[in-house]
Amino acid sequence: MVAFAAVWRPVLLVLLMLLPAPAVGEAYRFEDAVDLDHRGQLGIRFEPGVMVLGKAALDGTGGWGLAAGLDLGASKGLAWCGNELSVRARLFQTGDGRGLAAIAGYRAYAGSQHWKTFADLDLMVPLAPAPAAGARLGMGLMYDPSRRLGFSLSVGAFAALGRGLVSGFDGGLGVQVRFD
């Protein structure tokens, strides 16, 4: 029995090495990954969401509230890495009225297949109801069914100074359409 194992073990090993790779090994191909990143593409973003918005004015007034929002914007995929520069407008409705913010930033992606995570670093400038300027940090998950279309889930936190402090949290579900 020992002689059988000693003879057949190397033969089985050679046979296993000659077998084709399993389908799981074929799931990742570099060519597919390059096709699903955003290198050099222009994009249009549409992202409805909600915000928890806090305001503290210099006169001591302020408070917290819930706001419904909509981000509309454009993005440009960087040619060397697939990350994006973006510019967008955020329209939102609070119990006190309507608001508008301009947002410009950088989105860094981790991953190059259908599912990817991302981190946002943005300059956020609330214009109405009161002007302010500050930062927004965000993160999220992107699903790209194709090179030209992506769906995202994002969350973020922001703080801006102006006539007082505007801060809060946001979250949204987005759609991004991209063009070569």
Image: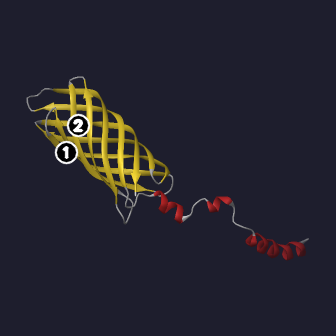
Say whether residue 23 is left or right of residue 133: right
Q: Dot 2: what SS?
A: strand
Task: Examine the rendered structure and indicate whether residue 94 appears above or below residue 4.
Answer: above
Task: Examine the rendered structure and indicate whether residue 146 appears above or below residue 169.
Answer: below
Residue that label 1 marks: 134
Q: Looking at the picture, how far across and down is residue 72, in whole percent?
A: 31, 41
**Foreground: 68 or 88?**
88
Label 2 neighbourhood size at 10 Å, few (<14), some (14-19), many (20+)? Answer: many
Q: Looking at the picture, how far across and down is residue 22, in whole percent?
A: 69, 62
Q: Looking at the picture, how far across and down is residue 82, in whole percent?
A: 39, 60
Quadrant of the frame with the C terminus? bottom left
Identified by mark 2, the residue type is: Ser
Residue that label 2 marks: 167
Q: Dot 1: what SS?
A: strand
Identified by mark 1, the residue type is: Gly
Which residue is painted at 81% across and 71% down in the image? 12
Say whether residue 57 is left or right of residue 140: left
Q: Are marks 1 and 2 in contact (CB under 8 Å)?
A: yes
Name which of mark 1 and mark 2 comes first in the sequence.
1
Q: Quadrant of residue 45?
A: top left
Q: Looking at the picture, how far across and down is residue 63, in whole percent?
A: 20, 26
Looking at this view, name the residue that lies furthest to the front: 180
Looking at this view, name the residue that lies furthest to the right: 1
